[in-house]
Image (cartoon, rainbow, N blue to C red):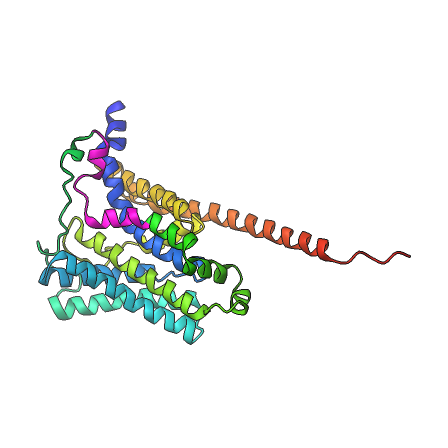
């Protein structure tokens, strides 16, 4: 029993958790920008997928770091399409997000067929494999060294993205404007905030983050791309940011929960647990998290409505004396 627990929760498993968390966290941080501005970007899945394809395709021709830039750009391009459709043409963001996901899924199959003659996957490439960062003596520290050593640069970017997002959200004019737009768009317009620009930039950021999330997914371990490799991680990122209310550290905690679930699913499979059962674990947790998030959001809305009614009652003039 102790051996099983050691295998499930050992230091090596912690490193796997960090590896699993990174693409979800990158996409969730990007999606949190749009969510804070009251735009739900469910197109993260498609943006991750096109980012993964661009990273491997360009990385195999050049080097993995250029591949990351290609993923960044590819995700941003889909984000521009999302922004134009939803902001300029006033299309429903859910419909646009679904369209982005379908567009990305079809586009990668087309490009795989045209460029590689194979609709399923790209050939493995050493050039498209992200190198691991050796921390030297830090890597010899028990647990911490195992956790942080030999991780890719995108793992470190993901970890730094959380405090960076917090800084932007709470310490910059753009963050103030973004929160104002999300909380009360008419009031933000009345205050002179350029709502279109604020939302457009948030969508662009979300696409770029989702693109490099796909790069991590494709280049961290395999150096190849398969047409279904995102495996709904974009939707899991949406669930994580919803559960975390698009707040930096709450979203990080939510992503860690999903990362733990995915890593445990892998470990349970190695221990001989039925693979179909273990692979459903992350998605079961996603459903549970969304239920809890829905309850929390409804409670918060009720509390906000109650406070607004109380404030209105307090501001109302007292009835005239008879």
Residue at point 43% right, 52% down? Answer: 170
Instruction: Specify the segment rendered in magenta.
Output: 142-161
Residue at point 13% right, 37% down? Answer: 136
Residue 52 visible in rendering: yes
Q: Examine the structure image and report whether residue 108 is included in the region drawn in magenta.
A: no
Residue at point 41% right, 53% down? Answer: 171
In the picture as drawn, the residue positioned furthest to the right comes out as: 322
On the image, the x and y values in percent for residue 50 come to: 24, 63
Q: Examine the structure image and report whether residue 152 is included in the region drawn in magenta.
A: yes
On the image, the x and y values in percent for residue 281 come to: 34, 42
Left or right, 265 with respect to 33, comes to left
Q: In the depicted view, which residue is nearer to us: 240 or 183? A: 183
* Relative height, residue 276 to residue 39 (above, below): above
On the image, the x and y values in percent for residue 318 come to: 80, 56
Which of the 4 quarters of the picture holds residue 187?
Answer: bottom right
Q: Which corner quadrant holds the C terminus?
A: bottom right
Left or right, 281 with respect to 195, comes to left
């Amino acid at each position: 029993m102790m051996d099983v627990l050691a295998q499930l929760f050992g230091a090596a498993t912690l490193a796997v958790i960090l590896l699993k968390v990174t693409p979800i966290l990158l996409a969730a941080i990007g999606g949190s920008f749009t969510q804070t501005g009251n735009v739900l970007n469910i197109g993260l899945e498609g943006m991750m997928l096109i980012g993964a394809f661009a990273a491997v395709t360009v990385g195999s021709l050049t080097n993995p770091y250029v591949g990351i830039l290609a993923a960044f750009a590819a995700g941003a391009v889909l984000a521009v399409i999302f922004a134009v459709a939803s902001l300029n043409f006033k299309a429903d963001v859910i419909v646009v997000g679904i369209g982005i996901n379908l567009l990305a899924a079809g586009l990668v199959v087309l490009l795989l067929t045209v460029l590689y003659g194979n609709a399923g996957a790209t050939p493995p490439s050493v050039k498209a494999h992200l190198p691991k960062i050796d921390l030297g003596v830090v890597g010899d520290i028990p647990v911490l060294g195992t956790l942080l050593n030999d991780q890719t640069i995108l793992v470190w970017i993901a970890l730094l993205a959380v405090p960076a997002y917090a800084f932007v959200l709470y310490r910059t004019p753009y963050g103030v404007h973004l929160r104002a737009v999300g909380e009360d768009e008419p009031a933000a317009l009345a205050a002179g905030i350029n709502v279109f620009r604020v939302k457009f930039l948030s969508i662009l950021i979300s696409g770029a983050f989702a693109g490099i999330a796909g790069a991590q997914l494709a280049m961290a371990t395999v150096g190849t791309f398969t047409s279904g490799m995102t495996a709904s991680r974009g939707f899991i990122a949406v669930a994580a940011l919803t559960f975390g209310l698009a707040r930096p550290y709450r979203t990080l905690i939510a992503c860690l929960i999903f990362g733990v679930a995915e890593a445990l699913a892998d470990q349970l499979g190695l221990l001989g647990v039925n693979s179909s059962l273990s692979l459903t674990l992350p998605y079961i947790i996603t459903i549970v998290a969304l239920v809890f998030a829905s309850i929390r959001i409804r409670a918060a809305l009720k509390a906000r409505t109650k406070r607004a009614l109380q404030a209105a009652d307090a501001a109302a003039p007292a009835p005239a004396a008879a």
